[in-house]
Amino acid sequence: MQTLTPARQKELELKANDVRQGIIRSLLAAGSGHSAGPLDMADVFTALYGYLLRHDPERPDWPDRDRLLLSCGHIAPVRYSAMANFGYFPVEELLTLRKFGTRLQGHPERVSLPSVETTSGPLGEGLAQGVGMALGAKMDGKDFHVWVVTSDAEHQCGLHWEAVMTGAKFSLDNLTAIVDRNFIQIDGSTEDVMPLEPLGEKYRAFNWEVFECDGNNLADFIATAERARAIKGKPHVIIANTVPGKGVSYMEGDYTWHGKPPNAQQAELALNELNAQRERILANV
């Protein structure tokens, strides 16, 4: 097991900043897309690609790789930016987001980009796909881990809870769901549109091991993920509490940024702010 040293943590924090800058640049180039969710999940995806996943960018189809599924495909810019920053393709390709013929579709497309395990689209389907992969791994005697990133709002979909039941039935301890608990969806607060609380208790009632953490704190998320992965006999869920739009002050906590990109002036403000944060990380302030 790796050790998260202060130097390694600083390296990952700088990489998360790079991921956020890639998100802003790609959304500006596209002129469409989602801002809040990708920004708030930059720390989680950095922790996954930079620390937790067993993967190899040089061998994206390595049979023994961990599987990472993105159920809430609309936050694709964070996955793409993380993949680029960890060596899967050139960072410059991020500027092709949502362009005709690009590999970087508005929702990830399995046949377009190596290591994208599933084509995302209808919300609520990702955990069902992950359950199938985790069960298949058990049947085949494989030891890879399956990670499924979900939004909180897609817990309003019935298929998701069918997958929760199935994961518990087969004791899939090689499966970890990660919930982006940012409390927003396109029409406002999740708790106004369709309340989810007590979310953790619902998972416990379905016989899952439940963890909560600060999803915008790399060290906290990594420590929580390692505790979850050590649990045997049942699947695990990490409720990662995040701030929508994290890292860009004028977006933070504002649900209206769920489904729109910044314009040129707004992108410049965001990048200036992120560069200032990068300098503070370098200075250890």
Image: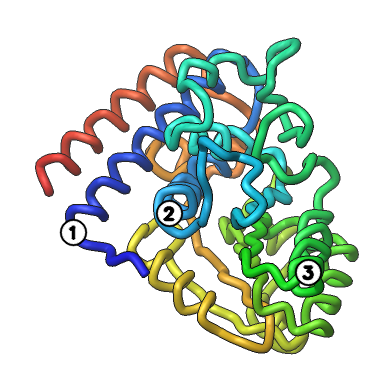
> Which sits in the foreground, 17 or 246?
17
Which of disc 2 and disc 1 is earlier in sequence? Answer: 1
Residue tagged by mark 1?
Answer: 6
Label 3: how many Cα within 10 Å (few below 14, some 14–19, many 20+) = few
In the rendering, which numbered label is found on residue 236? Answer: none
Give the side of residue 169 with respect to residue 211, left or right. right
Residue 122: x and y, percent?
A: 85, 45
Q: Are marks 3 and 1 in contact (CB under 8 Å)?
A: no
Say how the picture is coloured. Answer: rainbow
In the rendering, which numbered label is found on residue 140? Answer: 3
Q: Quadrant of residue 109?
A: top right
- The answer to whether 125 is drawn above or below residue 120 in the figure is below
- Callout 1, which amino acid? Pro
Residue at left offset 67%, top offset 75% = 199
Residue 239: x and y, percent?
A: 57, 69
Which of disc 1 and disc 3 is earlier in sequence? Answer: 1
Identify the secondary structure beneath mark 3. Answer: helix
Q: The N terminus is located in which quarter?
A: bottom left
Which one is closest to the eye, mark 3 or mark 1? 3
In the rendering, which numbered label is found on residue 47? Answer: 2
Give the side of residue 239 with respect to residue 85, left or right. right
- The answer to whether 100 is drawn above or below residue 124 in the figure is above
Residue at left offset 74%, top offset 10% = 100
- Callout 3, which amino acid? Asp
